[in-house]
Amino acid sequence: MRTSGTPNILARGTVLLVFIASTARFYGQVSSNTNAVVATPQTLSLDDVVREVLTNNPSLKAATANWLAMKERVPQARAWEDPRAEFDQRLARFVSVPPNAFSDQKLMVEQTLPVAGKNRLQGDAATAEAASAFEDLRRKQLDVVAKTRDACYRLANAYKQLELNRKNSDLLKQFAEISRAKMTAGGKSQGDVLTAQTELAKLDEAQFDLERDISDARTELNVLMNRPPESPLPRPADVAFQPMNLSVANLEALALANRPELASAARKVEAAQARLKAAHKEWIPEPSLRLEADRYNDAGQVVSELDAGFSIALPWFNRAKYRAGINENEKLLQAAQHELEATRTETLGAVVDQYRELETYHHHTELYQAKLLPLARETASAQRAGYESGNAGFLENLTAQQTVQDVESAYWDHLMHYQIALADLEALIGVDLIATTNSAPEHHHEGGEKP
């Protein structure tokens, strides 16, 4: 726990636009690094989408407004008590007294002096709470950007799956024509043609599902950018698989240093500590200085008398009240400390789980890219050549082509899940893993693999 970080966070907070711009640049780097969505006039740029989300998303605006509101509590908490002024005017006297026996006008000014420093402690608590709200804003930004990246990756995958669907439809149409020609020549039965047509119908059905997936992802992106849901969006460019050099130990250290939930919980502990100190100082009375000016009814001077005095509260006669206040704040501090400990433990567990998910999809993507997809394509090419020359059956050729379709479709699915897992891991940790891993020395994770 670093208590010295609170003022620095607020100082950075005064330049919110700079923070948002830097966040946009941070996620914009995705377009020029691993899993890049390349921007061309005909493709959707991921960094442009992220920039628009950070600028226009309503939930981010709400979180920003909440943080700015919390900052305004700091000067309120640090301020002195308001000075008091009192004026009395005699309206009527029903007894006979000498002219200057009593005053007719009285003016009094009073100010409480915060000698115990309770206002400074309350200001420290408000500062820590404002810093906690700033971390909540960071969490909202990380989550919204992760959702944006996830939707972009799902949109790119849906377009790729639709492209594969159409390519396989064209291929099946060729098989159907070849089978029809062989049937006319008497070399094949009508069953081959019907089988090809059946598979074509299945691909047509799958096309509608893929078009719905495209619509769903496009709608989500438009909503995140605060645009009409049916606004047109271009197709994202295809993305390339690029492994990352990560280890659980490094990820845990990064999460403990950068995760917004941990920083927010630490700031809440600081606020609770300040409020507990203030509760202990409730026993110290703070004096109110008073200056009073009187004017007698028959006096020629503006001020006949000038008095000064002071008053204090007597908290020692209300021991139960202040003892209960101390007990309350002690329990609140314990709750904040336990929350910080729980958040730290949950963070470590979440990092391990997310790393394992990333590792799994890294393994699947690499296996399909390096082995399964080349083998399936080679087998399909051989089967097609054999079928066209009459040395292989139609079903064997169709099965080989379906295997290619299934393997290639699975590859793009695994790549999409790998990208989403990486985006979610960065959102969980709260740091740019691309820049971090590129600047850090190489570390191998367990098993020698590098997802």
Image: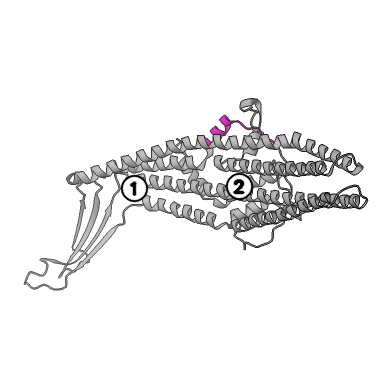
Is 220 left, or right, of 315 in this rendering? right
| Spatial CA span between label 2 and label 1 | 35 Å
Mark 2: secondary structure: helix
Residue ID for mark 1:
119
- The mark nearer the N terminus, 2 or 1, is 2
Q: Residue furthest top?
A: 447
> x%, y% of residue 418?
65, 40
Question: Do the CB atoms of the residues marked 2 and 1 lie less than 8 Å apart?
Answer: no
Q: Nearer the viewer, residue 110 or 221?
A: 221
> x%, y% of residue 100?
12, 67
Mark 1: secondary structure: helix
The disc placed on residue 38 is none
Q: Nearer the viewer, residue 86 or 173?
A: 173
Is 219 left, or right, of 199 in this rendering? left
- Amino acid identity at mark 2: Ser
- Amino acid identity at mark 1: Asn
Is 273 left, or right, of 319 in this rendering? right
Please say whether residue 245 is one of the residues in the magenta stretch: yes
The residue drawn where x is 74% and y is 52% is 203
Answer yes or no: is residue 435 visible. no
Answer yes or no: is residue 57 visible. yes
Is 193 left, or right, of 230 in this rendering? right
The residue drawn where x is 29% and y is 45% is 115
The disc placed on residue 22 is 2
Q: Nearer the viewer, mark 2 or mark 1?
A: 2
Q: Quadrant of the C terminus?
A: top right
State the image quarter where residue 356 is shown: top right
Give, as a single range, the part of the protein colored magenta. 243-255
